[in-house]
């Protein structure tokens, strides 16, 4: 828990006037939405959530940056529209989706959210309010997409919603015995399916290393889908903070084992609720309390895979040998790199895992993983990061100089900054 | 339902307007900042309110704006059956004590302005055989309390007025709904420390819309505040002098 000064108002441009950073729903795992210093105010965008224009012919939507994906789904899913790219939670704002340049299960075909953004309205550090797009201030536009909110306060976002044949998902999931089969399965599935992702039991070793479940999906055709729209999913709340012992190794092993063997059939096919497919964790409010008082972190990297599945294997081996105990480990093959200057995805295999924070072991573990990522020519996802060292980040980000140059041009005094930019980019605290 | 909404661009008013839009009610927005109202009008159209949602200028501190705004609403909606007032001003007791001009504005808007607007709206509703007049007062008007002395006094007067309206005109078809929100997490209360039982605007809006549909004369929201205020109303003075609630 971090104490800070939050400015929350329906009038986001006014709130941003005094703020050094804007934040949305605060679901970034790391410190990117936290203030650079305890006395520096942060604008909370969540009340600036109006939909400003929607063209049912083209699907083009313009909305204030605080509008959440949850609201968009509530308004549009039943009418046959969905965002072009959805991350793994719907508790995210459009401003956050832009700043993190989020990716989803369809990255191999549709790229990141930023690829679809047509225009942004920003409040710059000097108070000017500007529009930017591919044709108008394109550098600022490209730096803002995936720029972690460091180029200006995002006020409005414009992008096309996508028509869907029904609001249900047709899914297929398959139990996979090891990493080679998982990587091959993802690559094969990418050719036929618009949405794919794999879950890995990251405590399995040896021959079982990388075993897991491969999930594939597409929007269901009207003749396959139930006639009714998906019902509102009941959400459950984690009532208390779990004691630290809840996540001891045997429990984590048991969880991973149960998750794997719950999929007792080799293949399952059928109609899925879109929430169950896109946002499995959203069903549990405050699920982070399971991790107890110390909390947890997530590590996500992408590894180029010119030489097959070697990098992913080396990564998992390193993770296990460095004493890592993961809970939820997700693997996904990425498509092309996007337009965002600091955008995370690039062609290769992405691995994300959650683990509880240990005050001494976790920073060491992240260091060991980062060393491997640098050696493999990969990089990490800033939205998930809390522990990376600045020298490691610089080593994996040759694009940082170009990003810094744009930032300096629009904000020479570095007014807009975050705890993360202090840690990684050397901004003043 | 054909409704005139005063103060729907923010907070609980915004949440209530969205619920009404989602079920297809016809809406007309009035308020101080017309540019901002236009943005809210587009939001409500996309969420299901029959387009176009029109707007007009109306300011609680400018009673001369009341009649023209309601005239325009009558023309655009071809008559209305519901008026909802969520507009109002808020400031903390400390701010009001230190700034008499601010206190004058808050008292004028939350009592005199709101009551005069309701008089204008009530006449029009009665002229067409009745309708619903839903006004947001506050639990702050339930008892003189240290943190809301001035704001609470204006809201107490408003609640009393609305109760009188209900007694006199219910038989003639005017359904008065007096909403008494407890602490609700909106832009208005951002920066204040939320007490237990703090509510969310969406949940408040659902409860208020049910009260409007059923014509309930009084609604506490979140519901727990009915019990909280029952206790507060009955506490002896020597305790009220000691506590800071």
Image (tube, rainbow, N blue to C red):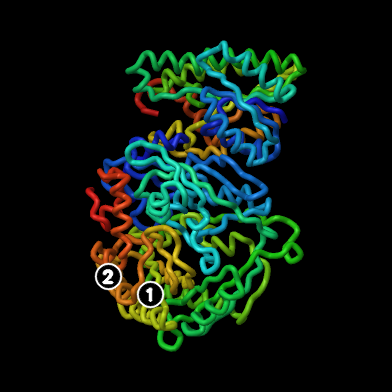
Nearest the camera: A60 or B118?
Answer: A60
Q: Position of residue A185 (x, y in %)?
A: 54, 80
Q: What separation in Å lies between label 1 and label 2 (alpha carbons)?
A: 21 Å
Nearest the camera: A410 or A332?
Answer: A410
Marks 1 & 2 on one chain: yes
Name the residue located 51 percent from the left edge and 38 percent from the top edge. Answer: B199
Q: Of discs 1 and 2, which sits in the foreground? A: 2
In the picture, residue A367 is in which quadrant?
Answer: bottom left
Instruction: State the count of labels.
Output: 2
Q: Is residue A179 above or below residue A26?
A: below
- Label located before the other in sequence (1 or 2): 1
Q: Position of residue B71 (x, y in %)?
A: 67, 16
Pick out the residue farthest to the front.
A135
Name the residue located 41 percent from the left edge and 79 percent from the top edge. Answer: A312
Apparent side of residue B221 relative to residue A288 in the rendered image (left or right): right
**Which chain's residue wears label 1?**
A
Q: Is residue B91 above or below residue A140?
A: above
Q: Position of residue B55 (x, y in %)?
A: 61, 26
Within 10 Å of disc 2 (Cα), the crowding (few <14, some 14-19, many 20+) is some
Q: Does any portion of residue B164 appear in the rendered image?
A: no
Residue under label 1:
A249
In the picture, residue B73 is in which quadrant?
Answer: top right
Apparent side of residue A87 relative to residue A380 in the rendered image (left or right): right
Q: Is residue A363 above or below residue A214?
A: above
Query: Which mark identifies residue A367?
Result: 2
């Amino acid at each position: 828990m971090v104490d800070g000064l939050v400015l929350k108002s329906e009038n986001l441009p006014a709130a941003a006037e005094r703020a050094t950073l804007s934040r949305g729903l605060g679901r970034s795992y790391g410190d990117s939405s936290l203030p650079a210093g305890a006395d520096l105010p942060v604008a909370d965008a969540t009340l600036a959530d109006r939909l400003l224009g929607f063209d049912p012919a083209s699907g083009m939507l313009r909305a204030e940056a605080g509008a959440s994906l949850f609201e968009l789904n509530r308004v549009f899913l039943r009418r046959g529209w969905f965002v072009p790219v959805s991350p793994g939670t719907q508790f995210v704002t459009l401003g956050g989706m832009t700043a993190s340049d989020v990716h989803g299960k369809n990255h191999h075909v549709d790229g990141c959210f930023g690829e679809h953004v047509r225009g942004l309205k920003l409040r710059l550090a000097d108070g000017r309010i500007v529009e930017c797009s591919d044709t108008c201030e394109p550098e600022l536009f490209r730096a803002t997409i995936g720029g972690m909110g460091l180029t200006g306060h995002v006020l409005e976002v414009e992008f096309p919603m996508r028509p869907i044949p029904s609001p249900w998902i047709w899914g297929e999931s398959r139990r996979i015995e090891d990493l080679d089969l998982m990587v091959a399965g993802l690559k094969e599935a990418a050719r036929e399916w618009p949405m794919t992702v794999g879950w890995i039991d990251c405590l399995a070793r040896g021959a079982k290393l990388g075993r897991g479940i491969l999930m594939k999906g597409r929007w269901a055709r009207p003749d396959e889908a139930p006639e009714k729209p998906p019902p509102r999913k009941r959400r459950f709340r984690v009532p208390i903070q779990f004691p630290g012992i809840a996540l001891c190794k045997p429990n984590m092993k048991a969880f991973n084992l149960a998750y794997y063997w719950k999929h007792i059939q080799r293949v399952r096919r059928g109609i899925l609720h879109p929430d169950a497919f896109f946002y499995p964790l959203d069903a549990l409010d405050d699920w982070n309390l399971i991790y107890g008082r110390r909390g947890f972190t997530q590590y996500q990297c992408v590894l180029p895979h010119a030489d097959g599945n070697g990098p992913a294997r080396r990564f998992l081996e390193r993770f296990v040998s460095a004493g890592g105990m993961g809970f939820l480990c997700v693997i996904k093959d990425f498509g092309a790199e996007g337009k965002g200057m600091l955008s995370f995805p690039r062609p290769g295999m992405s691995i994300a895992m959650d683990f509880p924070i240990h005050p001494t072991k976790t920073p060491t573990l992240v260091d060991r993983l980062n060393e491997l990522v640098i050696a493999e020519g990969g990089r990490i996802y800033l939205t998930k990061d809390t522990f990376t060292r600045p020298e490691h980040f610089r080593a994996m980000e040759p694009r940082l100089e170009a990003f810094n140059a744009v930032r300096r041009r629009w904000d020479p005094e570095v007014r807009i900054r975050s705890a993360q930019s202090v840690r990684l980019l050397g901004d003043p605290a | 339902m054909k409704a005139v909404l005063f103060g729907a661009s923010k907070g609980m008013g915004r949440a209530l307007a969205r619920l009404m839009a989602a079920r297809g009610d016809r809406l007309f927005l009035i308020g101080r900042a017309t540019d901002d109202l236009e943005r809210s009008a587009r939001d409500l159209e996309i969420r299901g309110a029959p387009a176009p949602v029109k707007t007009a200028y109306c300011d609680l501190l400018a009673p001369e704006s009341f009649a023209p705004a309601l005239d325009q609403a009558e023309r655009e909606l071809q008559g209305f059956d519901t008026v909802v007032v969520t507009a109002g001003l808020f400031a903390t007791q400390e701010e009001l004590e230190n700034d008499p001009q601010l206190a004058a504005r808050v008292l004028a808007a939350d009592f005199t302005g709101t009551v005069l607007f309701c008089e204008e709206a009530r006449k029009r509703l009665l002229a067409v055989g009745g309708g619903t007049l839903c006004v947001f007062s506050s639990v702050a008007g339930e008892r003189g309390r240290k943190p809301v002395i001035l704001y609470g006094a204006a809201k107490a007067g408003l609640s009393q007025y609305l109760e009188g309206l209900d007694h006199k005109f219910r038989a003639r078809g005017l359904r008065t709904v007096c909403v008494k929100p407890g602490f609700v997490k909106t832009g208005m209360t951002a920066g204040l420390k939320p007490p237990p039982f703090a509510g969310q605007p969406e949940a408040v809006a659902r409860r208020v819309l049910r009260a409007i549909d059923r014509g309930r004369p009084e609604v506490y929201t979140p519901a727990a505040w009915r019990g909280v205020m029952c206790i507060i109303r009955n506490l002896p003075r020597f305790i009220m002098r000691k506590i800071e609630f």
